[in-house]
Image (tube, grey):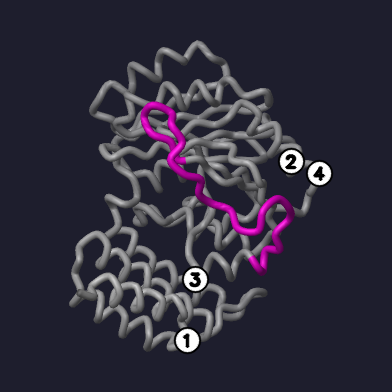
Amino acid sequence: MDWEYDLSVIMPVYNGQELVGDAIESVLSQSFDSYELIIINDGSTDGSDAVIREYLPSEKIEYFVQENRGVSETTNRGIREANGEFLTVHPQDDYSVSSRFDKQMRILEDNPDVGFVYSPARFVDFDGNELSTWGGWQGEGRVAGRDLFYKLYVDGMFIASPSVVFRREHFRDEKHPWGDPDLEVVSDWEHWLDAAHQYDAYEMGEPLIEMLRDPDHEHLASRKETVLAEEKIVLQRVRERYADGSHPVRRRHYARAMSNHYMRELKYRLREEQNYGSAAKLALKAFAFNPLNRDLYYEFANTVISRAP
């Protein structure tokens, strides 16, 4: 099939008037030219619409306005509207370096059996100061889909989703190509698990996107309860989906994944809530699923030391 564009950039927007202009400009300033930017205003109640319309003279932009449906369903719609062979989901508050698309598209064109390419991300504050770098696993180079699938499933999310450019062939559901619209936060994790079950990937060593993090800015830490609840849904669903897959999810994979999930919740209860009773119950669950989880003993030792007189 001949696509109208090489790349479709999907940008869901909800109440993003302060930052969406920078995100749009980072896309329009790309050195790569064969792309479209699909912006979907998901029922914003602030001045996002006015900011977005400042950029509509650009022929690169397709703009849609809808009633609020949530980020996952908005992303699904963006993909359905897309006319590109490759896609990326670009949040309203992130910034892509100008060479990003050019570098990633070259990798995909040179590696036709690679399904997606990703990079680490820089966390920056409102003044552009770098706070940390996150994402990545093995460093620059090709990553076997089987290895990536098990790493993502057992150890959890480590791909900076805004950095990913991916082929569209792996979609399981034409109506919901990005994933379950009922998942508010972790639909991207399930999406990359599905992709890694079908394709190898390519990991870039240099960060190509900046993700805003600020004490007053809502991000995953402020939605941790939702993340924890949705993680369990995905772990169970992926286990059932791929019980007999080419990369089968066996009982041992599920047990290690659930143990690590409870460890993530344990750390949250300890560090954010200082809830030692809840943490103790979670430790027992992590132990029951995987008594050999070294992270459990490491966390126990640190807790004992920190509470020692």
Which part of the image, by quadrant, shows the C terminus? bottom left
Give the residues in magenta: 123-147
Q: Are marks 3 and 4 in contact (CB under 8 Å)?
A: no
* Front in this rendered view, residue 283 or 243: 283
Say few, some or many: other residues with alpha carbon within 10 Å of mark 4 (under 14 / 14 to 19 / 20 or more): few
Q: Residue, x 50% and y 21% (percent of image)? A: 25
Image mark for residue 238? 3
Distance from the alpha carbon under mark 3 to that under mark 4: 31 Å
Q: In the structure shown, which secondary structural element does the residue marked by tag 2 occupy?
A: loop
Residue type for callout 2: Met
Circle 3 or circle 4, nearest the eye? 4
Say few, some or many: other residues with alpha carbon within 10 Å of mark 1 (under 14 / 14 to 19 / 20 or more): few
Name above or below for residue 34 compared with residue 186: above
Q: Which residue is mark 4?
A: 110
Confirm whether residue 215 shows in the render: yes
Residue type for callout 1: Leu
Q: Which residue is mark 2?
A: 1
Q: Residue furthest front?
A: 309
Distance from the alpha carbon under mark 2 to that under mark 1: 50 Å
Distance from the alpha carbon under mark 1 to that under mark 4: 42 Å
Q: Earlier in the sequence, mark 1 or mark 4?
A: 4
Residue type for callout 3: Val
Q: Earlier in the sequence, mark 2 or mark 1?
A: 2
Q: Earlier in the sequence, mark 3 or mark 1?
A: 3
Q: Earlier in the sequence, mark 3 or mark 2?
A: 2
Image mark for residue 292? 1
